[in-house]
Image (cartoon, rainbow, N blue to C red):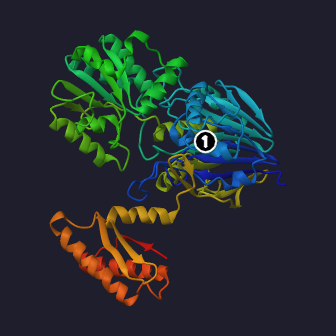
Amino acid sequence: MSKNLRISFLGGLGEIGKNMTVFEFGDDIIVVDAGLAFPDPDKMPGIDMVVQDITYLIRNKDKVKGYIITHGHEDHIGGLPFALKEVPAPIYASRMTLGLVERKLHEHSGLKVKAVAVRPRAVVKIGAFSVEFIHVNHSIPGSFALAITTPLGTVFHSGDLKIDLTPVDGQPIDLARIGEIGRRGVSLMLCESTNVERPGFTMSETTVGERLDELFEQYKNKRLFITSFASNVHRMQQILDLAQKYKRKVAFLGRSMVAVSDVAIKLGEMKARPENIIDISKLSAFKNEEVLVMLTGSQGEPNAALSRMANGEFGQINLGPDDAVIFSAIAIAGNEGAVADVVNNLIHRGCEVVYERLAAVHVSGHACQEELKIIHSLVRPRNFIPIHGEYKMLKKHCDLAKRMGMPARNVFMADLGECWELSASGLKKVGSVPHGSRLIDGYGAGDVDSSVLRDRQALAEDGICVVGLGYDGKSGDLVSGPDVIMKGLAYAHELEKVIVDIRGVVLDSLTKMPFNGSDINEVRNQIRKDVQNYFQKNFNRRPIVVSMLEKVGQ
């Protein structure tokens, strides 16, 4: 049994999302965060989310003493239900985070575990670990950095943070406590890297409120629709305050928007007068200038309410010249095209549309370079590993640490699956643990493998052809078919000819491999191969071919 501190990374390195870090000392393990990543729809068709491979935790489940959650964003809590099903342990987090986790666990057959709500500067003893929760600014209330103290020293884990001295909730980041922890001595810092490529400081969230106020005045005679990240509670609070100022009723629309607002209002993290909140079905009872809808869809998601409205497919609401739509969110990399499509469709319908390029209606919840320098100067760690970012971000953060005066020998680039050991002599890589991704389709974890993805991609790119045949079980004669069904393979004007051609190909196959005297699986494979060859030769495509053979009689 090692008497050194081991840190293993199961997510969040070389990627955005899927954050999970494992701390191990002796017979005790704590897990910091258990997030998800959103799949690339082109590479992972039909996949809902991606979570960590937790084989290492399963093998050591008796050692796992708790999950420490820094804040309530999906890339930090989204994988928690799947981890808890296989490795149950208490959860330690803020009230806001636990409120969101509770709703998530309820969706997973009411999964129940011990949950401990913690406040800023609270210290929790968990096995060999002592964990202090430090208030930081982010785009959701209840966000923490962590000071994890062990017999071998303290690890400072930043969580997600920014330095906002004029935050919406009036509670600036606890720089004083971070400085005290730094003076006490920090053996290792793990710090987020999301905005490390951006110079300067991240603007205060309150600056968005000032711009939104101008837009409320500008569009005071129109219905207002504002889309943002559902988890940005401080943004929603500013919008609620402006709605009250301009005497507008507010309706929430979209599953995540409704869920987060409900939790935040119940916990007092977001304040709203009950009489000012209306159901979306009541919208028509009010004049244009009296209503505001906060809704999901800021990333152009095809099934989101805003996308359906832009396409004229949302029955309850028909958008037009009487409406103004404000995008109070930045388009995440890869979503720019989808967002542009929604903006164009809204403009085509006659709406006034305000998006990031036209107005300062969004600020990030992550620290830029100058803020990260402040964190480094306060913590003054002996060793540093950047986390929470793609490799280019991690490299940039390593460079920043060196410019801040850290010796290059104490700055490390870690990778997924690597295990690092902190001892009295320093920090070093000591091996690896099982790691990777589990693909979630619905509520199932790990039930979609690479062969399923290949089939889905083939269906999307090359289509499917189904051939049905019936044959006499005694004589081996063909008694029905060949019947041909195709999807995604031929245009309407050529469909009839292609079906005739395929029937001919199948009959030729049966001359080479007749029902009588041949293994039925070999007949099936011969038909599939010949039909695929036909499509390859004539259309340069390789569709999925399914041959269905039915025996009639004995």
Q: In this orientation, does residue 203 appear?
A: yes
Left or right of residue 260: residue 533: left
The crowd level at tag 1 (other Cα within 10 Å; few <14, some 14-19, many 20+) is many
Residue 258 image offset from top left, x and y in percent:
44, 27
Label 1's element? helix
Residue 183 lies in quadrant:
top right
Residue 12 is at least partly visible in this image: no
Query: Which quadrant of the structure image shows residue 136?
Result: top right
Picture coordinates of residue 92 (x, y %)? Answer: 67, 32
Nearest the camera: 274 or 366? Answer: 274
**Residue for badge 1:** 80
**Observer-nearest of 429 and 494:** 494
Q: Which residue is drawn at 65% across and 52% down?
A: 54
The answer to whether 183 is drawn above or below residue 4 in the figure is above
* In front of the other: 425 or 451: 451
Q: Nearer the viewer, residue 426 or 12?
A: 12
- The residue at 30%/20% (across/down) is 292
Q: Is residue 379 left or right of residue 137?
A: right
Question: Which residue is found at the position 31% from the left and 23% from the top?
Answer: 212
Residue 418 position (above or below residue 12): below
Q: Where is residue 533 in the image (x, y as percent from the top left)?
A: 33, 81
Which three-letter amino acid code belongs to the residue tagged 1?
Leu
Q: What is the number of callouts on the image?
A: 1
Q: In this view, does 332 lie to the left or right of 383?
A: left
Which residue is painted at 44% across and 30% down in the image?
232
* Above or below, 551 relative to 154: below
Residue 276 is left or right of residue 55, and the answer is left
Instruction: Please state, as top left, top right, bottom left or bottom right, where the N terminus lies in the image.
Output: bottom right
Q: Percent x, y for residue 399?
A: 52, 52
